[in-house]
Image (tube, rainbow, N blue to C red):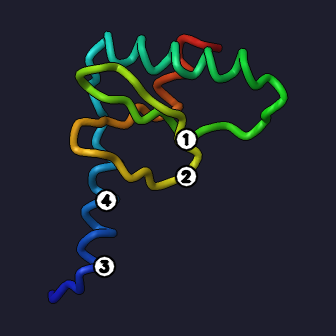
Amino acid sequence: MVYTSQQWQEDYYQERIDVPMLLDPSLLRAARQIYRTYYEVHPDHTQRPSGVAIDRYTFRGKLIFRSRPILLPRECFVPFSQLEAEIY
């Protein structure tokens, strides 16, 4: 089967989504804190984020509301499903 560039990217991305991710507990804690802070500052926002993009070394991050995040090389993505396990 011959793949076009876009078909390959879609298949690759889909495979990466299906693999469960094991994250460093300190990254997970920092991502939860980023979400908590955002929620406390903006309680009127009802849109649920898809997750948090967080730098592996500085633990600085931002909420992501798109379904397919674009990450910098030092960043990792913590999906909201992993954040909500302890929040709710």
Q: Amino acid at mark 3?
A: Gln
Q: Secondary structure at mark 3?
A: helix
Write down the quadrant of residue 49 in the picture.
top right
Task: First in sequence, mark 4 or 2: give its number.
Answer: 4
> How far apart are the two marked residues, 3 and 4, measured between alpha carbons?
10 Å
CB within 8 Å, label 2 to label 1: yes
Q: Where in the figure is residue 68, as x and y percent of width and height?
A: 45, 55
Quarter in which the N terminus is drawn: bottom left
Q: Where in the figure is residue 75, as x and y percent of width and height?
A: 29, 36
> How far apart are the two marked residues, 1 and 3, measured between alpha carbons?
23 Å
> How far apart are the two marked residues, 2 and 1, measured between alpha carbons?
6 Å
Q: Secondary structure at mark 4?
A: helix
Using the image, tell me which numbered label, if any, was put on residue 50.
1
Q: Amino acid at mark 2?
A: Arg
- Direction from residue 32 to residue 59 in the image, left or right: left
Q: Amino acid at mark 4?
A: Tyr
In the displayed structure, would residue 8 be above or below residue 52?
Answer: below
Using the image, tell me which numbered label, if any, was put on residue 83.
none
Q: Secondary structure at mark 1?
A: loop
CB within 8 Å, label 4 to label 2: no
Residue receiving disc 4: 13
CB within 8 Å, label 1 to label 3: no
Write down the quadrant of residue 55 in the picture.
top left
The residue located at (54%, 35%) in the rendering is 63
The residue located at (62%, 16%) in the rendering is 37
Comparing 75 with 20, the one in front is: 75
> How far apart are the two marked residues, 2 and 3, measured between alpha carbons?
19 Å
Using the image, tell me which numbered label, if any, was put on residue 6.
3
Q: Where in the figure is residue 69, as x and y percent of width and height?
A: 43, 50
Q: Nearer the viewer, mark 4 or mark 2?
A: 2
The residue located at (49%, 33%) in the rendering is 62
Task: First in sequence, mark 1 or 3: give its number.
Answer: 3
